[in-house]
Image (cartoon, coloured by chain):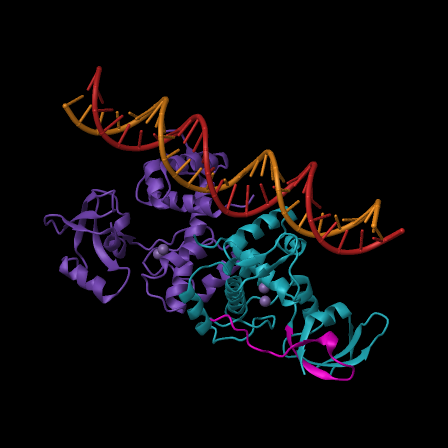
Chain colours: A purple, B cyan, C orange, D red
Amino acid sequence: MAISFAEENYLKIIYRLSESTSDDISTNAIAELTQNKAASVTDMLRKMSEKGWVNYQKYQGVRLSEAGEKIALDIVRKHRLWEVFLVNKMGFNWDEVHEIAEQLEHIESEVLIDKLDAFLDYPRTDPHGDPIPNKKGELPQLGYIPLANMPMGKAGKLVGVAQDSAVFLQLLTKLNLKLGANLEITEINAFDLSVSLRIDGNPPVLISHEVAKNVLIKR
Amino acid sequence: MAISFAEENYLKIIYRLSESTSDDISTNAIAELTQNKAASVTDMLRKMSEKGWVNYQKYQGVRLSEAGEKIALDIVRKHRLWEVFLVNKMGFNWDEVHEIAEQLEHIESEVLIDKLDAFLDYPRTDPHGDPIPNKKGELPQLGYIPLANMPMGKAGKLVGVAQDSAVFLQLLTKLNLKLGANLEITEINAFDLSVSLRIDGNPPVLISHEVAKNVLIKR
DNA sequence: AATAATTTTTAGTCTAGTCTAAAAATTTTA
DNA sequence: TAAAATTTTTAGACTAGACTAAAAATTATT
Ligand SMILES: [Mn+2]
Ligand SMILES: [Mn+2]
Ligand SMILES: [Mn+2]
Ligand SMILES: [Mn+2]
C-alpha cells in the first residue's frame, strides 16, 4: 500500500516540529499544524506506529522512526526543490510559493526529482534559506543555521541572511540586527513561534518566526 | 467545496470518451477507463449530476454539461502543458511522461499554469501532437487525420498520435516514426489493411492498421 | 413477442480520515 | 499532595469513494 497524502503531511509536520526540539512531539502540537483535532491525530499516530514510521507511546508523545524520518526528508526535499523551481524558473516571489509546493511535494517520481535537481543546478538551499536534503536524506552542512532552529537559551553570531528583499533587510536594520551581532534566545513562544532575542547583551526584543527563519547564525 | 481528484478524473475520462463519439457515454465505458466497477461509476454520476457537471439520466448514459466540459478542458490543458515541460525541459522521452502528468494535472494554481505556459513558449500541442486548450478552453484547430485514412500514394507529415500508452510510443520510436517525419503510403494490403510506408524517403516498412489508426498526419 | 443476454442500478458493506463529546491520564497550581 | 486545569485518548458518528451481490431495465436473439 502506497503512502497517502495525509500520512505524508503528518510525517512532514512531525519532522518540522522535531527540528526545533529534542523532546517527543505532543499530540496538540501536531493537531495545530495539521489543522486537525487532537483526537484525529491520536488516531493517525496509532496507525503510523503500526506501519513503523513513528515511535509512539500513549500520552508520551511521538518521535519519527528511522524509516519515518527518511520519508519526511524526502518530502522536505521535494517541497524545497519545487520552491526553488517556482522562484528561479517560474518567476514567483519567495512569499508566493509555499502553498503550491505543499501540493507539488506529493508528486511521486524519483526520476522527476533527480532531473529537477539537475535542472535547478543542485541548489543547497530553498528560496527561504532552508537546506535541501540530498537523495539519501542528508542535509548539507551549511555551517550556519536559521536563528529559528537555534534552541532556547543558546547564543550565536549573525553570519548571514537567507534572502535579500528590501523590506526584510530594512526591518533587520531597524531591529539593530547586523552582521556580527551576538544573538541569544531568551524565549520561544509556542503560540506563534516568535522569539525573544538579546542582541549584543541588550534587553531582549521580540521578533517573529518569519524573521527568525531568515536570519542565519553560527553557534 | 473544492473538486476532488476522483471527480476530476471522472470528468476528464468522460471528456476523452466524448471526443470520439456524439453518443451519450455509457457507465461501462467510464468504468473501464477509471478502473472502477460500474456500480461505483453510477454512484459518482449521480453525485456529479447533482453538482451540475454532467447531464445524466438513469440507464441513458451521460454527457458533460457546459460547466463540466470547462473543468475537463482545464485538466486536459494542465496535463498537456506538464507533458511539454517534462519532455522539453526535463529531458524525458515522450513515452515516459503520461503517468507523471496524471499526477501533475491536479495541481491547483491558475497563475502557475499561466507562468508554465509562458515558460514553455505557449505550445499548441503536447509531445504526442495533442492540442493544448487555451485558458478559455478553446482548442487550436490542427487539421490532423489518422494515417489510416490517408489514400494510397499520398504523402503527409507525422504531426501527432492518437494515444500515449508507453508500449505504443516505444513501438513508434523503434519504427523511427517520430513527430515531423515525412510519410508516404506505397501500399495498402486489402487482407489486413496493413500499410507499406516510406518514412523520410527510406525503403518502405510495414505497419499494422492498428498503428496507422493511431498515427496522425497532416497532408 | 417471448426469452436470453447484457448493462445498469440499488442495497448494503468497507476503509480512510475526519469530527464531537466524554472519559482518562498527566501536569500545574494552590 | 490534593484539587484544578490541561492534555490526550476513547467511543461513536459521519462522508467520500470504493466494493460485491442481487434486482431491475435495456438490448439482442430466437
Ligand atoms: Mn515551504
Ligand atoms: Mn521553504
Ligand atoms: Mn498523457
Ligand atoms: Mn499527451
Residue A25 shows in this picture:
no
Residue A219 shows in this picture:
yes
**In the picture, which quadrant includes the N terminus of chain A?**
top right
In this rendered view, identify the residue nearer to me: A179 or B27: B27
Q: Is residue B157 magenta?
A: yes
In this rendered view, identify the residue nearer to me: D17 or A114: D17
Residue at far left of view: A202
A1 relative to A180 in the view: left or right: right
Q: Residue D10, image x and y in percent?
A: 42, 26
A212 relative to B136 in the view: left or right: left
B186 relative to A93 in the view: left or right: right
Q: Residue A41, image x and y in percent?
A: 40, 37
Q: Residue at x 42, y 70 (%)?
A: B115
Indicate whether D6 appears above or below A67. Answer: above
In this rendered view, identify the residue nearer to me: B17 or B50: B50
The magenta-colored residue range is B136-160
Q: Residue A115, image x and y in percent?
A: 50, 63
Where does ligand 4 appear, by image quarter? bottom right
Q: Residue A47, image x and y in percent?
A: 47, 36
The answer to which image quadrant residue A65 occupies is: top left
Indicate whether A19 appears above or below B8. Answer: above
In this rendered view, identify the residue nearer to me: A142 or A71: A71
The answer to which image quadrant residue B179 occupies is: bottom right
